[in-house]
Image (cartoon, rainbow, N blue to C red):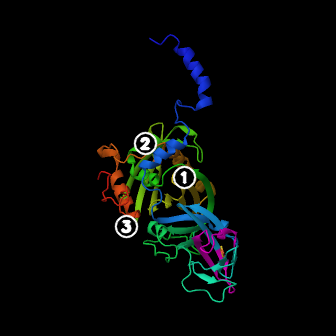
Amino acid sequence: MPFPFERTFSRVRERVSPLVAPRVRRGSPLPPEPDVELARLTDYPSPYPSGWYALARSSELRDVPLHVRALGQELVVFRSKDSDGNETVGVLDAHCPHLGANLAGGACRDGKLTCPFHEWSFDASGSVCAIPYAERVPPRLRTRSWPVEERDGFVFFYFDVTHARGRRDAPAPTPPYSLPKIDGLEPGGTLVHRGDHDHGVVRMHLLEFCENSADSAHFEPLHGAMFVPWTSTKIPGLRVHHDATWSRDDTHSHMTWFRNHAVLEAFGKRLPKTAADAAICIAGPGGVVTFHFDVPRFGRIVLYQTHTPEAPLRQRVRFRWYAERTMPRALVWYVVGNWIAQWREDIAIWENKIHQRKPMLVREDGPILAMRKWYGRFYPSGTIHEPPPNEPQSNDAPS
Ligand code: FES
Ligand SMILES: [Fe+2]
């Protein structure tokens, strides 16, 4: 029996509540509020694990330095040519160790980056090479530099948690792993560039992408529908059957593979000729992901998907793809657009979920805990849930 004035009250509440803040919404989550985001953050692992990340596209990096805010760092990325025409690409802390000017306002010349304030010059290793008004440059003056590699259209850098917390004049660490080289992308290789897409920022933790690949039970409910490529429009009568597995790479301990065999179903009938395989390589904690699509009778497509944490729950997502020259462009557009349409279905989940440190799981859920355990290797303590400083270490994720 409803309360006598319930309808009147609810009408008044509906009118007044937008003036305060919405508290109820039907069918989709409420928009985020700062305190909710903060609470979400407290249960997630630390947002910046060690690994390779894309800082920029090669096309963005010309002869003017770029200021990039990522992984909790203020960074400057520069490309500079020496007098012989040899190019250097470097990533340094953005703020000059002298008196703190932002080096992004400086100049790229002679293979160095020169500060706009007193014109100290730095090479890509962070060493101070010249101080125009000083009689001599004291030895071992340097700023923090980061390992960098430019390839396949991206400027990647290696973020190291210990290096970030250490002395700023410590030399850059040697990355414990390299990004995998992709067959066909070497100069003169069989793959050619076919497109780029910048998605912008997704409000999620980096871990979620890896966790998604091990979470086999979500494929049918979330990715079972067939979409018009690049959109969220479902195609009636068509479904996609997924057969997905997650596994660690046998020889490279920093890599995992997510393999998916997908077949279309039209009105409940499977169409074996539509079967296509995708092998997805996650190198490191998920900053750089490469998809290898094999389309029977047509050839191979390679898609880069990069996640760069710009803030704890903010991932900048970029795509870039290559295909065999003989592949029809429309087919490449369809395959890539199909993946991106499926990936977009995950975003609404990621942006509104929390991290369950001790999830309630059943046997058929997939190797989620094994994935979390593996992911711990990208944190100094070896676990994703780092203990607070000065407390004994323990992994509170069940194993
Ligand atoms: S602040 Fe950079 S040279 Fe002085
Ligand atoms: Fe997914």
**Label 2 residue SS:** helix
**Label 1 residue SS:** strand
> Is residue 339 something one can see in this rendering?
yes
- The percent position of residue 26, horizontal first and vertical second, equals 53, 29
Labels in figure, total? 3
Residue 360 included in the magenta stretch of the image: no
**Label 3 residue SS:** loop
Q: Residue at x 46, y 44 (%)?
A: 39
> Mark 3 belongs to which amino acid?
Ser
Left or right of residue 390, residue 265 in this image: right
Badge 3 is on which residue?
A: 253
Q: How far apart are labels 3 and 1 at the CA level?
A: 27 Å
Q: Quadrant of the N terminus?
A: top left
Q: How far apart are labels 1 and 2 at the CA level?
A: 27 Å
Closer to the camera, 146 or 340? 146
Tell me the magenta residue range.
79-106
Left or right of residue 184, residue 42 in this image: left
- The percent position of residue 49, horizontal first and vertical second, equals 45, 61
Mark nearest the camera among 3 and 2 is 3
Closer to the camera, 47 or 84? 47
Quick check: 56 above or below 17?
Answer: below
- The percent position of residue 72, horizontal first and vertical second, equals 53, 60
As drawn, the label of residue 220 is 2
